Image (spheres, rainbow, N blue to C red):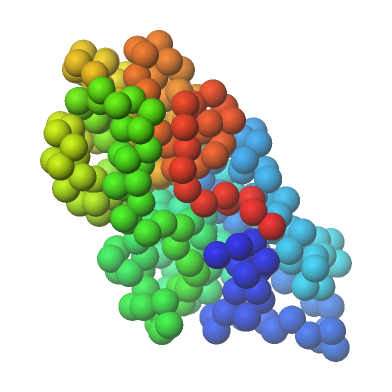
Amino acid sequence: MKRREFIALLGGAAAWPFAVRAQQSERLRRIGVLISTREDDPDGQARAALLRQGLSELGWTEGRNIHIDYRWVGGDEARAKANTAELVSQKPDVIVANSTLLLAAVRNETSTIPIVFVVVGDPIGQGFVSSFAHPGGNITGFTAFEFAIGAKWLELIKGIVPELGHIAFIFNPEAGPFAEKFVQSIEPLAHSLGVRLTVTPTRDAHEIDRALVAASGEPKGGLIVSPDAFTTANRGLIISLAARYRLPAIYAYRYFATDGGLLSYGHDAKEP
């Protein structure tokens, strides 16, 4: 879904507590926004700017008829829970949750405030919504990936490194519980290509380093990084370690490549 479609979703979601009409009164509405990156992350700031721009195009302007409260969590589960609880306590009119980690946190805090989710890996499989057509409850939004893209990641890295004999897949269990569905896509192709697959959960910087050290010890090894809030927040470390250990790596988001990673393949979160 492109940015304009997402903004239209925000404006027209069934759970949205106020309709965008020119004739309505200018009562100040409060929007809570949970973003998975750190506040100083350029991509996170770009997401926030695009949201403000899109809302402005629909007639919602900060300081005139809306106030936006941001919370930045940097892929940290404890911070996500604390910041979400604080935001919910302020009783905003609607909350935007950017990532599976944050959607899980805010769902546990409220069943009444409308929630619009963004870039969530498996909203139906994780039980956040019943379906996209009829989400039910107070949650609606859209996902970011088809899980079949996992095989495409392997295909692309194999094309760059034809001699590839081992691929490591790293993910964070809390931020990316949907990772197994990517693995299910990767496994059959890995088998047909004669590439051995290792799946490793990572929860902190030490475990990231340990996983990449292990992968670099495999002959003809490579790396696939699952798209979740934790790996995104720690992309600088992952990219630098992949370079240090000479591991060819593929990522889901373009900003991994622009930050120095070898290759990315996925949607552009900032596409107009």
Relative vertical location of residue 1 with respect to residue 8 in this rendering, above or below:
above
Q: Position of residue 5 (x, y in %)?
A: 62, 70
Q: Nearer the viewer, residue 189 or 67?
A: 189
Residue at point 67%, 81% (across, down): 18
Q: Position of residue 155 (x, y in %)?
A: 32, 40
Relative to 42, is 171 on the left or the right? left
> Can residue 177 be spotted in the picture?
no
Image quarter where the N terminus lies is bottom right
Relative vertical location of residue 11 with respect to residue 247 in this rendering, above or below:
below
> Can residue 43 be spotted in the picture?
yes
Q: Residue furthest top?
A: 244
Q: How many marks?
A: 0
Residue 218 is drawn in which quadrant? top left
Residue at point 85%, 88% (across, down): 23
Q: Nearer the viewer, residue 139 or 118?
A: 118
Residue at point 45%, 73% (across, down): 139
Residue at point 19%, 16% (across, down): 219
Q: Position of residue 209 (x, y in %)?
A: 32, 19
Relative vertical location of residue 72 with respect to residue 102 in this rendering, above or below:
above
Q: Nearer the viewer, residue 204 or 130?
A: 130
Q: Position of residue 13 (x, y in %)?
A: 57, 79
Image quarter where the C terminus lies is bottom right
